[in-house]
Structures are given as structure tokens and as C-alpha cells.
Image (cartoon, rainbow, N blue to C red):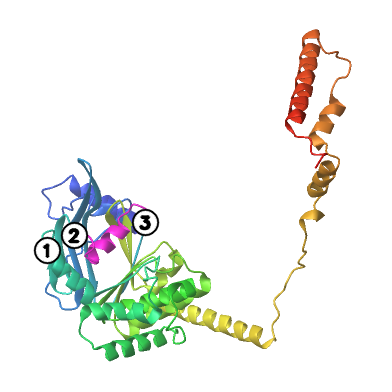
Amino acid sequence: MNGNQHDLELNEVKAKSKPTEENTVEFNEDKFFGNTRLQKDDPNFNNEDVVVAMKNVHKTYLLGIEGVPALRGVSLTIKRGEFVCIFGTSGGGKTTMLNIMGTIDKPTKGELRLCGTRVTNSTKDSELSDIRLSKLGFVFQTFNLLSSLTALENVEMPMILHGVLSQSERRQRAKELLDMVGLGKRFDHVPSQLSGGEQQRVTIARAIANNPEILLLDEPTGDLDTVNTHVVMKLLTELNQKNNITMVMVTHDVALKNFADRIIWMRDGKIQRIEQVAKHKKLEAIRKVEEELQNAQQKKQMIASGQFKRQEGVIEYRKPTDYKPHSHYVKSVSSMQPATKQNVNNNSVSSRKPSKVESDDETAEAENSQDSITSSNQLIPNLDHL
């Protein structure tokens, strides 16, 4: 923090002690979070460019008779076509805020408007389901594809529920969407036959099937490797720029923050700060992803043509009999005397003589065993005459 900012905060603290002056500034937890100065975001519900407007939204979950606050007075405005990233520690309220935007949860208190529709705690579930079907698209970390349906059928499902297109139109649009995400040859594959990156691309195609205004992304790259992360982020940025779809993404990967227009930092159920991403940083992040994908594609082609050989280490194959414990075990079994018993016999003290009680017990055991053998022989009939 530089000296000017420090002087500004010091003057504001001094102004609090003089309430009669005109430059009085209220010093409370809502306007100050640590050393970060926050500006009040006053949502304008009448602005047509605003697709998400939250004003003093609270969400409290009941745990028995005790309430657990997840959101504590969140005010936020998201404009059409924006790419917003939500960061924060676990328990900070990221997922709760995304669920409220997606009408999965209802706000306990406050005002929420989605695409011109007011949402409160008393809004009917039928109305919320219509909003989710026509205005919102969801991309989850765990994909949530229907395992018994093919990729084409998974993409068709939201259009079937919407009931606007005919069967042939639905099938044609599903094929176009899968072609767009690079899965034109995977129409008839079920999710178990697809990789993680391919399943996530099917999920994105399914999410935009009904032309939603907002795409809600909950850790979309959490289960993906580096290459598939680049593929998914390139696809999302293209949808944001070309189709003007509003993106709201929750993630823990700080490396993805430069893809967004704004970054919302959450902490303890409140917005800690809102960071604006410079345009050149976003363009640089997109350019870097495109270069990484081109390099990966060139390397893949070189491997397929035999021009590039992977460095393979020496592979040594062994059988169970090659190991020393195995041979030692086989040797001990063949001599019918376990190795542990041999060690015990070799290390035992031979100078100690058995007591009289031990000798009598051993003699009795030997007699009993002999009697049992004799009695068992008597039970076997003599078959010599046969």
C-alpha cells in the first residue's frame, strides 16, 4: 500500500470522530474489509444490459435449530456478455452464490433478478424450472451426464424438455453442437467411452442447447489435465465472445483468472473485493492457450507420423520366482520345515532340561496319539480277502 492510500484511510478514520463535519465517512464492515476499500455496488434492475442483479442477498441454512449463514448481504451486478470469475477459500460462499444465481437455492433475504425476472424465497418451483430450462446453462465439475445415453442423446435432452424444436431439428442441432466442440465422430459413444475432456465438452454442448443467456460454471476444469483445460477454456472464451453468452465461473485455479473480465473475491459470505482484469491480460491468456494447443497438436502429429519418438525407459519384466523371498519360501516348503522354525531351533538354548511336569505331559500326549492311531486302524475293515 502506498503513502497516499494510507493517508486517505487515516483521514477517513479521523473524519469518523467528527460527525458534525460534511466529509463524514461511515467506517463499518461493509465498506472496509481488512485493508481493502470497497465500493457499494447499487444494482440497477431497470437496465436491460444487466442479466444478474443481487441486492443485499442473504442465505442461511438451518442446522437443527441453529442457523448457518452462507451469504451475508451480497450486492452484485453482472452485465450481458461479461465473463466473471468467483474466487475464494472453502466456505466463503462461492458455490452458494452460484446456486442462488442458478435458482437451485432461494435467497433467505434480499432481492434477486435474473434476466428480468424477480426471484424471492416465495417464488414457485415451476417458475424457477422454466428459468433454468430457457435462460440458464450449467456446467459441473463431475459432468453429470446420463450414463445410459449417448453423447448425441445427452445433448438432445434439454431440447426435448423445452419442447420447441421437432425431432429432426433437435437431432440436427445436437450434431452441430457436437461438431462445434470437436466431437463430430463421437455421436454414438456413451460417457464411459469418453475421456474426461470429451465428457466436459459434451456437457458444454448440452448446456448451450437451448441458447441460454447465462452459463454457470462450477469448477469446469477441476477434473481435467492441462491440455483438456486449455481446450475447455478456449471453447468457453469463444462462446463468450462470439455468441455473447454471459459466463459466471467458480474455480480455485488462479491461473484461469485472466480469462475473465472481472474477478470477485469471496470471503466469509461477503464480497471481499472486485478486481477488473486489463484487456491486454485477457488477450495474452487467450493467445497463450492457442499456442499451447497448437504445440500439442503438432507433437501429436509428429508422434503419429514417426518423426518424434518418446523417450522410453528400460522395462524389466520379472516373474514371482525371481524374487528372493519366493525362492526362500519354496526351499523351506520343500524341506517340510518352515524357515521360522529353523531359526527358532538354531537360536534356542539347549542347556535347559525339561521339567518333570513337561516330561509327563509329553509322555501322555504320545500315548494318547498312539491310542488314537490304533483305534482308527481298528475301524478300517480288512479288505485282503477281497
Rounded to the nearest whole Å, what is the CA distance between mark 3 and mark 2?
Answer: 44 Å
Looking at the picture, tell me which residue is in the foreground, 207 or 219. 207
Q: Do the residues labelled 2 and 1 touch (CB within 8 Å)?
A: yes
Q: What element carries label 1?
A: loop
Q: Mark 3 points at which residue?
A: 3
Q: In which quarter of the image is the C terminus?
A: top right
Other-residue count near label 2 (Cα within 10 Å), few / some / many at <14 / 14–19 / ≥20: many
Q: Is mark 2 on a helix, strand or loop?
A: loop
Q: Along the horizontal axis of the image, is 362 left or right of 138?
A: right
Residue at (19%, 54%) from the top-left corner?
58
Identify which amino acid the numbered label 2 is placed on.
Lys
Residue 209 in view in this figure: yes
Q: Quadrant of residue 357?
A: top right
Rounded to the nearest whole Å, what is the CA distance between mark 1 and mark 3?
Answer: 50 Å
User: Which residues lie in the magenta part?
Assistant: 90-106
Instruction: Say whether residue 99 is magenta.
Output: yes
Identify which amino acid the numbered label 1 is placed on.
Thr
x%, y% of residue 62? Answer: 21, 46
Q: Name the residue under label 1.
A: 123
Q: Quadrant of residue 190?
A: bottom left
Looking at the picture, tell me which residue is in the foreground, 323 or 90. 323
Looking at the picture, tell me which residue is in the foreground, 239 or 256. 239
x%, y% of residue 224? Answer: 48, 69
The nearer-to-camera label among 3 and 2 is: 2
Other-residue count near label 3 (Cα within 10 Å), few / some / many at <14 / 14–19 / ≥20: few
Residue at (12%, 51%) from the top-left corner?
21
Q: Along the horizontal axis of the image, is 32 left or right of 124?
A: right
